[in-house]
Image (cartoon, helix red, strand yellow):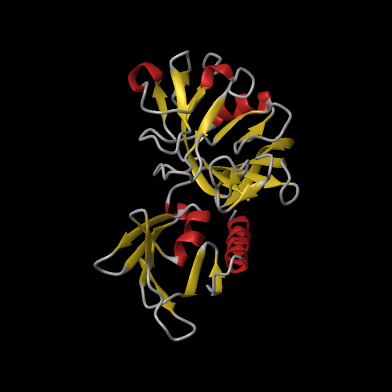
Amino acid sequence: MRGILKKLVSGVLVGCIAFGTIATASAIQGMVTKELYYGDISVSLDGKKLTLTNEGGGAVEPFAIDGTTYLPIRAISSALGLGVEWNQEGQEVKLTSPEEQSVSSCILVRPHADGAPEATVTVLEKDGDFWKETMSTDEAFVGRNGTTSNKQEGDGCTPRGIYTFGQAFGVAEDPGSARDYLQVGEDDYWVDDSDSVYYNQMVKKSETEGQWDSAEHLVEETVAYEYAIAINYNTSCTPGSGSAIFFHCSTGNGTAGCVSVPREMMVEILQTIQEDTIIVIM
């Protein structure tokens, strides 16, 4: 598992540099980068200080867009699924990695090629200090345009990173889910209107009508959402960053941004998924 995460870190760093970011890193150990080059801003990972300097000698200032403070480090951390907290007064970025949490199982999603929707999904369970494969399929799908580290609403891509899971739900009755399960009905929607205060949230139409212009009517997706579970992506509900990212039953094609597997595997995953299960999308 550590090797998988290490590969993901390396890929994200290369991706950031390709987009013009001048960040560099040295001595990667697991998910922890020992040294980063970015200004004189203090950064800590799981409470441990990281050394940040500017390779060129000048300061790199944070900048704000729509009330949110951004740093170049945020692109890396967000892609890895790290928690990011910015302390303006102390000029400090606090990151929290999934490795600080107890993880008993992991769902690994590997696209067959860049930009392709076909993927392999493997379920790994922790056995002492080792990980063992319990389920796998080559008949899985991600977004119709592949995966991305810069997810945007409507781009047809699945967001890369490490995430936990949210609400399990489905059009069908509870298949014996190990987690709380909601059988959706006519009143259940998932808002994808970026201008709504309910963006990227499951709502009751009867309680929120008139407060959004666009949403998925979950009960209409009788094949894909026969059984599903929400992936905890964009839980801050940042407008335009993507919504309704689910793990659900396959329809035999690429998705709008979700991850899908054959129905039988989806049922088995719901029956065995734990509160600490994570998903790694590459």
Count of numbered tags: 0
Q: Residue at x 45, y 75 (%)?
A: 38
* Residue 182 drawn at (x, y percent): 46, 20
* Residue 262 drawn at (x, y percent): 69, 28
Which of the pair 66/149 is nearer the observer? 66
Q: Residue at x 65, y 40 (%)?
A: 143
**In the rendered image, the vertical position of residue 74 relative to residue 138, given as above or below:** below
Which of the pair 51/246 is nearer the observer? 246
- Residue 218, visible in the rendered structure: yes
**In the rendered image, the vertical position of residue 45 relative to residue 203, given as above or below:** below
Q: Residue at x 66, y 42 (%)?
A: 133
**In the rendered image, the vertical position of residue 167 relative to residue 171, given as above or below:** below
What is the quadrant of residue 13 in the picture? bottom right
Question: Residue farthest to the left?
Answer: 89
What is the quadrant of residue 42 in the picture? bottom left
* Residue 237 drawn at (x, y percent): 41, 41
What is the quadrant of residue 157 in the picture? top right
* Residue 260 drawn at (x, y percent): 65, 33
Q: Residue at x 64, y 20 (%)?
A: 223
- Residue 176, visible in the rendered structure: no
Which of the pair 56/102 is nearer the observer? 56
